[in-house]
Image (spheres, rainbow, N blue to C red):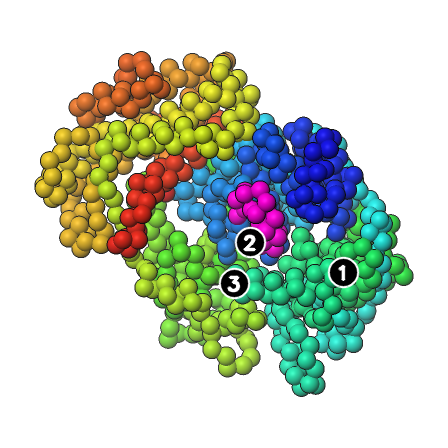
Amino acid sequence: MDIGFQEFFQETFGNKPYPYQVQVAEQVLLDKNMVLVAPTGAGKTYAALAPFLYSKKIGKPVADRVIYALPLRALASSLHQSTEEIVKEKLGLDVTLQMGNQPDDPYFQGDIVFTTIDQLLSAYVGLAFGTSAPASNIPPGALIGAQVIIDEFHLLSYQEALLTFLEMMKRLKHFTQFFVMTATAPSEIVDRISLHLNTTPIRLSNMNQLNRTRSLQWHEEPLSVDAILKSRGDKTLVVINTVDRAQQLYLELQSRLVDEGMHLPVRCLHSRMFEKDRQDTEKWVHERFYKKAKAPAILVATQVVEVGLDISADVLITDLCPANALLQRAGRCARYEEEIGKIHVFSLVDAEGERLPSPYDVERLCLTEEFLISNVPSQMTPEFEQSIVEYVHGTLDVKELNEAFLDLPARADVIEQSLVSGEGNVQELVRLIDNVSVLVHNAPESLRLENKPERVSISTFRLYKLIKQELEKVKEYDIGWYPIFEKSQSKGLEVTWAPIRSERDIRGCSLVCLSPQIVNYQKDVGLLLPPFSGNRKCLMSKEQKTDHARANQPFRYVRETYLEHVERIRSLFQHEEQLHMFRVANDKLSKQLRGQDGQLLIAYVAELVGALHDVGKLTKKYQIAVRKWQVQYRNKDESDLLAHTDYDGLNPADRKESKKKMYERGNHAVEGALMSLPIFDETALRFDGQAQEHAYFAMVLAIMRHHNAFSENYKEFSIAKRAEEIVGKSLSGLFDGGVQLNHEAEDLSSYKNRLIKPDVLALYWYLVRRVRLNDQLSQRLLHEGKEDQNGARITVDSV
C-alpha cells in the first residue's frame, strides 16, 4: 500500500491505521468486494470508509457514493453525526442520513449516506420506504456505481432481509461494490457469504493490543432498579430488550433517586423518540460515556446501543439476549485500551417462572443462558467470545443460511415481480415485523410531509395491538389517521388523511398519525403507549405546532418553452460536476454493456434520454391546452411550443380556472416514449451484441416512467405541428440526423418485463434517476431566489 494512504488515514482520523485497515484498503482500492470480521471496538467503521475517502481525495474514486446500512436507526444516526464532523469539515463531502423518522435523503444523493437495512432493501425491491410509489424508481439508481456497506450483517433476518440482500449482491455484481462486516458471525457463515461475493474474508480475531479487561457475571433473577443501584459503577449502561420495559425502569429509577436524595444523572435512549430529543440524549451520552469521561452517569437504553455507537461504560447491566447481541452490548463496555469493565447479565424469567417479553428467538436465548451458566469466565477473552458464538449460533445460523441459499431462485422471482409491477410484499422481502413511522398530532391535514414533521418508530405488531384495543374503548373521537397518497403521472405528491376505523386500515402503511389523546410524548421518555401512568400533557414539537401555518401552500410555475426546458436539462447533464458524480457508474455500465465509446457512450445516452424526456408534451392536446391558458386566460401572445405555463397557486383565480376541462393537458410520459422509438432504435446500434437490445429497452422505459415508476398506458394522441423541427433543434450536437418521431400506436406495457434482465435494470435505474433528479434541479434553478418573495411552493412535476 502506498504510504499516501497511511498519511491520509492519520490526517483524517487522528491516528495511524491498524495493519488490517491497510489490508482492507488494498482490496477495496482494487475494486474487490470485502468481508471483514473484527471485534467490537476494532475500528471497522474507519476501515470501511477510509478507502473510499482516500480514493476520492486522490481523484481515482472506487465508488460514486457509499451507502452505509445498519440494522438499527439510532446507530445510523450516531455514525452519521460522528462521520459528518470529520468528513464534511476535512474533505468537503456531503454526509446524509435517511431513516423513517429522519428522511433527510430519500433519493440517496449524499456522498456518504447512512441508512437502515430496511430503507436500503425496500428501495432495491422497488418499494422504497422514503418515497411515494410513483417516485420509487429514483432511489435504486444510487446503487449503480456505489459501494454498499452492510454493518453487522449477522443481525439480518435470514428469511427476509438477508435473503434479499444475497439476491441483490448477485443481481448487481457487475455494478456495485459490496462491503460486509461483522463482529460475531460464526466462521461458516462468514465463509459462505465470502464465497457468494467471490472474495476472501479478512479476519481480525484478536485485538489484545487494546489491553482491555472485562469480567462477566450471570444473575438468575430479572433486571430491576435494585439490581441497577447495587451493580452500578461510575459510567453505567443498562440495556433492556424492549422499549416499554426500558421506559418503565427509567421512570422507576428516576423516582427512586429522588426519594433517596441521590443526585445521579440518568437518561433514557430508544427508538421511540423524536429526532431532536434523541440527538440531545445522544450528545449527552457522548459527553458522559466518551473515552476519558469521568463524571458519573446512568444510561437506560435498548438495542439501539448495540452496533456502531462509540461509547464506553465501566459497568454494563443487561437483559439476557442471544450471544451475538450480548457481545455487541459488551462492545460498549471497557471499549478502549487499558480500560476495566464489569458485565452483569440478568435472566428473563421472573419469580413466578414467567418469561419477560423479548423480541428474540427463544431457542437462541436458551442456548445463551445454558452457556453462561456453565461457562462464565473470570475474564472475557477472544476465545470465550468465539466459543459462545459458535455454541449458540453455529448450528442454527448455518442451517438457516443454507436454507436461504436454497430459496434464492424463488426469492429472485418474487423480487423481479416486485420490480416490474410494484406489487411486492415488504414483510416478505425486507422484514417480517417491520416498523411504522408515527406522527403525533390532532390535525394531520395541517402537516406538510416535505417539511419532515417529527415522528417516532413503532413495530407494526405493537401498533396493530394498540389500535385494536383503543378502538374497542374509544368511540367519541378519532384515535388516529392514515395517509392516502395521490398516484399521478403529472401531479405533485398530494396526501389526504383518513380516520383509522380498523387495524386493517394501516396494513402496508409506513406512516400513520396518532391522536395525542391516546398516546403521550415526553422529551425524556419518548412516546409512551397506553396504559401509562401520570397526568402528563402530551407534547408536540415546535415544528408540528407551527406547521399548520405553512400547510397547503400552493404550487407555482413560470412559462418555459420546450426548447428552453431541454436546454436547461442538457446543461445539467453536461455539467462537469455531474460527470464526476456518475464517473464510476458510467465506467461499470460501459464495461458491462460493451459500448463502442465506453463511458462517453453512457453519458451520451443519459443526456439524450434527458433531452427527450418531455417530448410527449409536443402533442396537439397538450399544446392546445397550454396555449389556451396563456392566450385566453393570461392574455399573452403565444406562438412557441411550451413545456410549462405561467401559473400562480397563490392566486385563487388561477386555481379555479385551472380546473376547467378546456385546460386539461393529459399525461405525456408513455406518449413521449412512443414518439422517441425511432431515435432509440438508431442510438441502440452504438452498443455491441445483446447490449443493443438492453440499451433500447432501458431508454424507452426511462421515459415511460419518468413521472411514475409504474406507468405503462397512454391515450390516443397526435403530434403537434413543428414538433419534429423543434425536437431536431433541441438535439443539436447530440443527434444531428434527421429527426423522425413515431406517430404509430404501439402497446408498450410488456416492456416492463425486460426489467428482470440485470443489464436492462441497471441502465434503466441509472437513466431514470438522472432524468428525474435533473428535472427537479432544473425547476429549482429556474425559480432560484423567487420562492421566498411570495411564499409559494415550487412544484417538481417529476415526482
- In this view, the residue in front, 54 or 774, is 54
* Residue drawn at the location 73% of the way across and 33% of the way down: 3
The amino acid on which the numbered mark 2 sits, given as a three-letter code, is Asp
Mark 3, residues whose alpha carbon is within 10 Å: few (<14), some, or many (≥20)? few
Label drawn at residue 39: none
Q: Quickly name the residue at label 2.
A: 434
The Cα–Cα distance between marks 2 and 1, rounded to whole angstroms, is: 29 Å
Residue range (magenta): 76-96
**Where does the image place residue 371, in percent across and percent down from the top left?**
84, 57
* Residue that appears at 27% across and 36% down: 667
In the drawing, what numbered circle is on residue 276?
Answer: 3
Mark 3 vs mark 2, CA separation in Å: 23 Å
316, above or below 140, in the image? below
The residue identified by callout 1 is 333
Is 660 inside the magenta-drawn segment?
no
Dot 1: what SS? Answer: loop
Q: Is residue 391 left or right of residue 244?
A: right
Left or right of residue 283, residue 582 in this image: left
